[in-house]
Image (cartoon, rainbow, N blue to C red):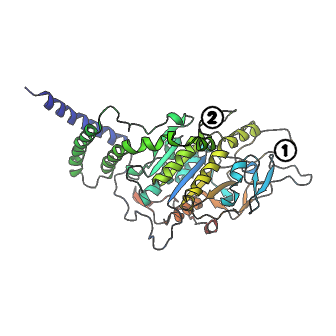
Amino acid sequence: MISRRNMLQTASCGFGYLSLQALLQQQALATTTSPSPNIGGADLSTIHPTAKRVIFLCMSGGPAQMDTFDYKPQTGSKKHPGSVFPFKQRGESGMWISELMPETAKHADRLCVINSMYCDTGNHAQSFLQLHTGERLRKRPSMGSWISYGLGTENNDLPSFVSLNASKPSVYSSEFLPTKFAGTPIGTNGEDMSKATIRDISGEHLPADIKRRQLDFVQSMNRDHLAERPGDATLEGVIESMELAYRMQSFAPELMDLNNESEATLKRYRVGKKLSVGTCRPTDFGRQCLLARRFAEAGVRFIEVNHGGWDQHKDHRRDLQANCETVDAPIAALLEDLAARGLLDDTLLVWGGEFGRPGLVPDNGKDESGHNEKGFTFWLAGGGSKGGYVHGRTSETGDRAVEDKVHFRDLHATILHSLGLKHDQLTFQHGGRRHRLTGPEEARVVHELFS
């Protein structure tokens, strides 16, 4: 005869091992090598970090740079691709910004615009992968995971890397880096962010003391398992992730609850305003930006905000206008709040997509655009970047970058450098060689982008 208590405890042991086995199977593709001795990336005494965290405003699909931040006026009788929306010079810097981004334009003197970006392919999937991981053909750890690996967290109750409205696993995957450096996805592409939450952490079915006892019981088995497998990075990652998930149950729900924000704040961020026009996807982008500000305040190292629908082959004018209307005011509100709270000085904002657009010929009656990986625009703000500055340029027709070109790997190296990390020293041993975000090819830090 066995008691009910003994039976439940025995069953719990079995379920605990089953749960652990399932977690390990999900991570079976990850390498269990130990972290690089270079974790932390660089000798911080040789690099003065200008930023502590990054907010990446990812515009998936390829924003049309010639109708947003790269002014290409038509001159004389030549009919070549150019800007089809009016531009104005903004701020004391006189930066040219489209009428489609009037609220963001008010922060022109905070923007560091790179009009000479380029990458290796005009295919969405490959270029999106390269933007996030440094490689376009093979799955690799995302930029957020590398930063999390190099710097760790500022808040032990939250993940160091969060991805809002994540569209693809490549956005937040740690791949062969230890599991604890993977991003935490919140929401999915097109989802109503007001209902989005961090999956599987609510734990509302049990009182807090019971949840703690349950976790302690399962973790004791996990640690016994680890004792027989010293140095198993995957198993260590599971144990750490489970502890983090428990702590997040108390911290994250309150952080994501916007009920304590003022009506004026919600209005500035356009929270709850969803726009779905043509190929533009319904999104509550303002809620993402407000959550990004709150996560930055709470000490999250890397926050990615995603807005899709920029792949505008037809109805270019209508859909571009709709997209800009969606993101403009929330981005301006984010810039304003970060500055007012003293966070913009050490928070680096990065805006851009996987490539750009070749532009339209204004007088030919067509409203179609393709892909352009040879010349497009990103911008930075805060984190020590040079405000009111335009770096590089494209040709007269905007078809390619021709001056001070910046590749994705240069952008990655520059972002890491702003955080005090040397891109060529932030490495991880996998598959017989050391890997890094910037890959085996030459990458350079674009020092001109910083004051």
Residue identifier under label 1: 362
- The residue carrying mark 2 is 274
Q: Is residue 356 above or below residue 267?
A: below
Q: Is residue 376 above or below residue 323?
A: below
- Image quadrant containing the C terminus: bottom right
Q: Amino acid at mark 1?
A: Pro
- Residue type, numbered disc 2: Lys
Res 274 quadrant in image: top right
Across and down, in percent, residue 277 comes to: 69, 33
Rendering coords of residue 325 (x, y %): 69, 41
The mark that comes first in sequence, 2 or 1, is 2
Q: Nearer the viewer, mark 2 or mark 1?
A: 2
What residue appears at the point 80 percent right and 49 percent down from the top-left corner? 83
Crowd rating for badge 1 (residues with CA inside 10 Å; few <14, some 14–19, many 20+):
some
> Which quadrant holds residue 22?
top left
Residue lying farthest to the bottom in this orientation: 46
